[in-house]
Amino acid sequence: MFTANNKTVPITLFILLLLAFVAAQAQDNLLLGAGTKFDICPTDKNSVCNVDFHPNSELLASSGYDKFVKIWHRTNGNIVHQMEHPAGVPGLDFSDDGTLLATGSYDNKVRIWDVASGKLLQTFAGHQGMVIKVQFSPDGKQVASASADDTARIWNIDTGESMTLAAHKGDVWGLTYNPTGNLLLTGGEDNHINIWDAASGTLVKTLTDHTGAVLELTFSHDGKLLASGGDDYTIKLWDTQNWQVVRTIKSDSYSIYGLSFTPDDSVMASGNRDKSLFGEFLQYRFGYQGGGNSVTVRLWEVKTGNLLKQLNGHGDDVNNVTFSTDGNFLASASVDGSIIIWDVNKL
């Protein structure tokens, strides 16, 4: 037995407490050794923070609850450009050639920016609700947008003309082109994944295996797999040849907000909500945030679905995750206003 403060404590409890302390210290060392944290997104208790890597793997763009989108350096956080919007910006995406940045705003509009100068090039109006996500087509000729008006749109970059994709019942959250750019996929509050012909806007197929809102969609780089995640607390991997689920990944996390494959498609990162429903209630009503070890990024082996590593450091929901083009870094963005850049080689 072990005695502390005149009370007898079982030695096993003492050992457990010691192990917990050591584990917490190990997480702190992991953050300090493998990740750099930037508090760059001004936040509100109901806000978001998003990040995207530039193709050069040196610059990032981030946005959140406030009106400014920032393009900044990975190494020191120095801001290159700061683009002002009339309202907050929940969605952004670099074009594959790195020359353009698309943003989606709470003012229901999509904007196209010149990365080199930070100048506004185009503003696309048509959505009747906030623009939640945007993504360029692989050839850079289109930009797609997902909205709280229950639709997605495909915009012609040159002309500003758009096709409206209306099949979901509820907000559209997930959005991704396949690597060849001939298909656009959308995920909705209705638990469905819709597959669209990107040239004509025709609905090709609907996938109904999720039992909660589909919040995130992304393809592997070789196009053989689709990863989807959402409010049913699962990640599903789909064979894109027959659109059948080949693996369902479940963990002790809740909603899945972000998914990203490494360039060789061997590992997948996920950003999660790890708080319970009661924790979410405290967040939305009172702005409560958990500790730095309570909300995580997870790394999964794609071939087996096994959990490889859990990265702690954020204090609130992880909105999205993205690997750099060279695969050396992983960026994660959180509702707590922070972005952590993880050195993959140290992980």
Image (cartoon, rainbow, N blue to C red):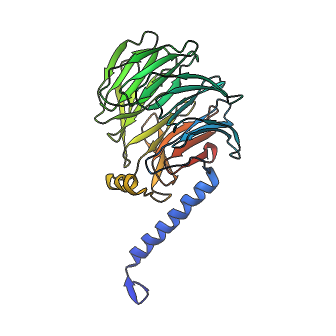
Give the left or right position of residue 231, taking residue 60 as reference: left
Q: Is residue 157 above or below residue 70?
A: above
Residue 218 in sight: yes
Q: Is residue 313 above or below residue 189?
A: below
* Residue 90: image location, x then y, percent: 49, 37
Give the left or right position of residue 176, taking residue 275 as reference: right
Residue drawn at point x = 42 percent, y = 38 percent? 305
User: In this orientation, which residue lies closer to the viewer: 136 or 36?
Assistant: 136
Numbered-mark total:
0
Give the left or right position of residue 293, taking residue 202 as reference: right
* Residue 320: image location, x then y, percent: 50, 40
User: In this orientation, which residue lies closer to the viewer: 57 or 338?
Assistant: 338
* Residue 134: image location, x then y, percent: 50, 27
Residue drawn at point x = 52 percent, y = 37 percent? 87
Residue drawn at point x = 50 percent, y = 51 percent? 336
> Which residue is situated farthest in the bottom direction here?
6
User: In this orientation, which residue lies closer to the viewer: 244 or 113?
Assistant: 113
User: In this orientation, which residue lies closer to the viewer: 48 or 88?
Assistant: 88
Residue 226 in sight: no
> Which residue is situated farthest in the front direction here?
86
Which quarter of the image is occupied by the N terminus? Answer: bottom left
> Which residue is situated farthest in the top direction here?
200
* Residue 191: image location, x then y, percent: 31, 31
